[in-house]
């Protein structure tokens, strides 16, 4: 199957073609969330199985998607979009707070979003890995977007005198890997801690990056100069 089939047009049952299409897409994505994020997983799922789980036909599937990779890509973007919305809302609501409190609020918002459903963690951090060049490009692009977000917040903190002035891109890239890995391991039950404890640890790590040993706020006496 090389492309999507054309779906029906016009009103039916009181709903427009666009409304029916949106409902079909929602049902296919819900089925993909269940099958990819739980059992049997993306690689063991067929179009027929996903269509059956959605209560729709394979013809209807190909009216919406080129293949299962499209479903996985859409779910991955959905998870990231929701997390980004949560982070932006938390950041906007805490601009007036000190760095430590801002960071905690933002990470709590991110963690609450991505861990709200274990199936979404599996899809985003496990199932998408190694599928193919297209999804790898998408995964890295979204990771780069998170790196940009951390760098932007670090620049704000540095301008306020709350963090060191430096290029944070490498540190932010490494930190994002730690965030994703720790949240995945916590969700899988490999980390014996509450989510609040996990977030607190991530905040401590971030503050250690933003405020390296020997750094002092502008205007504060350097520790070595104090006698």
Image: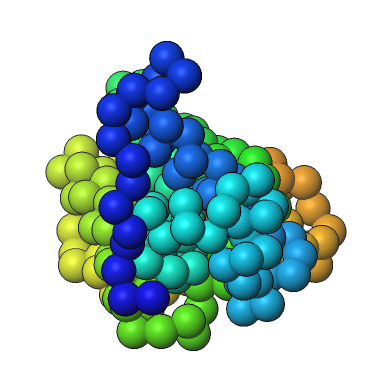
Outermost top residue: 14
Kindly identify the residue that appears in the image at 82 percent across and 61 percent down: 189
Kindly identify the residue that appears in the image at 69 percent across and 52 percent down: 53
Q: Nearer the viewer, residue 90 or 50?
A: 50
**Figure quadrant of the C terminus:** bottom left
Kindly identify the residue that appears in the image at 58 percent across and 63 percent down: 123
Q: Nearer the viewer, residue 107 or 30?
A: 30
On the question of residue 128 being in view, the answer is: yes
Q: Nearer the viewer, residue 3 or 223?
A: 3
Kindly identify the residue that appears in the image at 18 percent across and 58 percent down: 165
- Visual colour scheme: rainbow
- The spot of residue 188 in percent (x, y) is 76, 63
Q: Is residue 186 left or right of residue 11?
A: right
On the question of residue 179 being in view, the answer is: no
**Figure quadrant of the N terminus:** bottom left
- The spot of residue 55 in percent (x, y) is 65, 45
Q: Is residue 60 left or right of residue 157?
A: right
Q: Is residue 122 left or right of residue 62?
A: right
- The spot of residue 86 in percent (x, y) is 43, 34
Q: Nearer the viewer, residue 113 or 162?
A: 113
How many dots with numbers? 0
- The spot of residue 96 in percent (x, y) is 31, 22
Vertical arrangement, residue 148 with respect to residue 126, above or below = above
Instruction: Tell me which corner region of the image, top left, top right, bottom left or bottom right, holds residue 220.
Output: top left
């Amino acid at each position: 199957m090389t492309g999507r089939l054309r779906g029906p047009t016009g009103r039916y049952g009181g709903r427009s073609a666009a409304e029916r299409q949106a409902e079909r897409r929602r049902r296919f994505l819900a089925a993909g969330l269940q099958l990819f994020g739980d059992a049997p997983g993306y690689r063991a799922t067929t179009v027929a199985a996903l269509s059956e789980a959605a209560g729709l036909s394979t013809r209807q599937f190909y009216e919406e998607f080129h293949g299962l990779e499209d479903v996985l890509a859409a779910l991955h973007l959905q998870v990231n979009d929701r997390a980004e919305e949560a982070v932006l809302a938390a950041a906007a609501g805490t601009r007036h707070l000190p760095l430590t409190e801002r960071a905690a609020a933002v990470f709590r918002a991110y963690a609450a979003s991505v861990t709200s459903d274990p199936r979404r963690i599996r899809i985003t951090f496990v199932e998408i890995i190694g599928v193919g060049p297209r999804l790898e490009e998408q995964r890295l692009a979204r990771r780069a977007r998170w790196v940009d977000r951390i760098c932007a917040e670090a620049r704000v903190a540095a301008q306020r005198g709350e963090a060191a002035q430096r290029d944070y891109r490498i540190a932010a890239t490494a930190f994002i890997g730690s965030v994703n890995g720790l949240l995945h391991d916590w969700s899988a039950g490999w980390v014996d801690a509450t989510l609040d404890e996990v977030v607190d640890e991530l905040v401590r790590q971030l503050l250690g990056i933003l405020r390296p040993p020997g750094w002092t706020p502008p205007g504060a006496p350097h520790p070595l100069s104090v006698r």
